[in-house]
Image: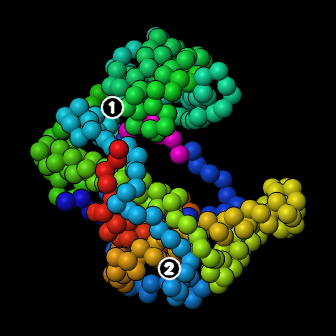
Amino acid sequence: MLKRSSAVILAMLFILTVFAGCSGKKDPLKDLSSLENTPIEVIPSTTDYDIPLSDDLKYDINFADYITLPDITTLELSYHTMSVDDTSVNNQMYLLQLQKADRTEITDRGAAEGDVVTVNYRSVYYGTDQQISNQSDVEISLGKHIAIPALEDAIIGMTVGQTKTADIVYPEDYAGNTVLANSKATFTIELKKIETAKLPELNEETIKSFGFEGVTTYTQLREYIINWMEQENSLYKQDALYNALVKGAELIAMPQTEYSFYLKRFEDNCNAAAQSMGTDLEAYITTNYGTNEAYKTEQEKYAQDNVKKDLVIHALKEKYNVEVTKEEYNRALNVTFNSEAASLGITDIEDFHNKMGESIYKMELTYQVIGAAVADAPDKK
């Protein structure tokens, strides 16, 4: 059984964190399959923190007066699933070995099948300037077809420093984004590095070095990866269900306490962004929104979107009688602290709890609520 840490981390896709609003967006497209969400070891906190429940976000209301949820049993869900077969499992094992491989850089020939290359690339829809993806320092194992096969084929023969343009059709079963399946795109590819990689044997020492608790044998490693892939597939369905519920829900009225809370949060976030840039809110608004009217429009949209998402989750919480315990909150806090705190510049778990606790609670609540609701949802069409 996999630790739920991977599920908790992935559940962060379901919500806006405390830093949402007035911030850049990450590119959601990923072209490479990887184990980047593999469960991590958790360093337990010696302190149990109380769940941070804001008085302004308790939603002590009759939800039927504020929102109508779609019928979960009739929703049409569309989502990607990984094929849990020998080829896919072998690819994941290869990616783990590659992390531990001895590498030799190649400079005297073009890229060939079996090489590991590092590339920058930008893709746009064919015949347009509409960008699909813009990636830097992407590592691709040529011939493995873990990346887009046609992209791998286009790279073969390229030399270090070369830039190439290639028209590529995304595969029918493209894993990165189902919307792109069968779409034609133009890729501009820059080859930065060519390497050969000598993989380590999958012996007990190597397998232990991957850091998966209780996994020391080849058989256990395969079972672990299969369980991880199956859990990922379950999470893809949960993500699709959440998005369908938010899209299909109809707002009847806006609870004013919660709405005002998010209006203020947006302003606080913009104030913080302005201070970090050494300016004031008025100048920040002028630079980023142009006019106060445009700023207010974005602020109101932010508040409405967040309240709607909260109403969906809390209405389902009531429907399925879900409650996050203090133990579950602290578990989620520890997992997320270990995986995310460093990137946010936070080194102390108490500070992390104080700044991110509310979002961690929402993350865990969302995970549990959607996990309960998914049993009523149909499989993808």
Q: Is residue 224 visible?
A: yes
Q: Return the residue nearer the eye: 253 or 166.
A: 253
Closer mark to the observer between disc 1 and disc 2? 2
The N terminus - image quarter:
bottom left
Relative image position of residue 11 (x, y in whole percent)? 42, 61
On screen, 195 above or below 5?
A: above
**64, 107: nearer the viewer:** 64
Q: Is residue 364 above or below residue 155?
A: below
The reply, left or right, for residue 244 in relation to residue 277 is left
List x then y, in percent, for residue 207: 20, 46
**Quadrant of residue 265 in the image?**
bottom right
Earlier in the chain: of badge 1 and badge 2, it is 2
Direction from residue 10 to residue 56 in the image, left or right = right
- Which residue does the image show at 74% across and 72% down from the upper left? 267
Residue 195 makes an appearance in the image? no
Residue 85 is drawn in which quadrant?
top left
- For image coordinates 36% across by 53% down, the residue present is 237
Residues drawn in magenta? 28-33
Would residue 280 be counted in the magenta stretch? no
Name the amino acid, label 1. Asp
Q: Which numbered tag is attached to residue 168? A: none
Please tell me how crowded label 1 is: few (under 14), some (14-19), or many (20+) other residues with Cα within 10 Å: few
Query: Where 381 sits versus 45, above or below?
Result: above
Disc sitting over residue 102 in the figure: 1
Residue assigned mark 2: 64
For numbered disc 1, what is the local secondary structure?
strand
Residue 298 left/right relative to 178: right
Looking at the picture, which amino acid does disc 2 mark? Ala
- In space, the residues marked 1 and 2 are separated at their CA atoms by 61 Å
The C terminus, quarter of image: top left
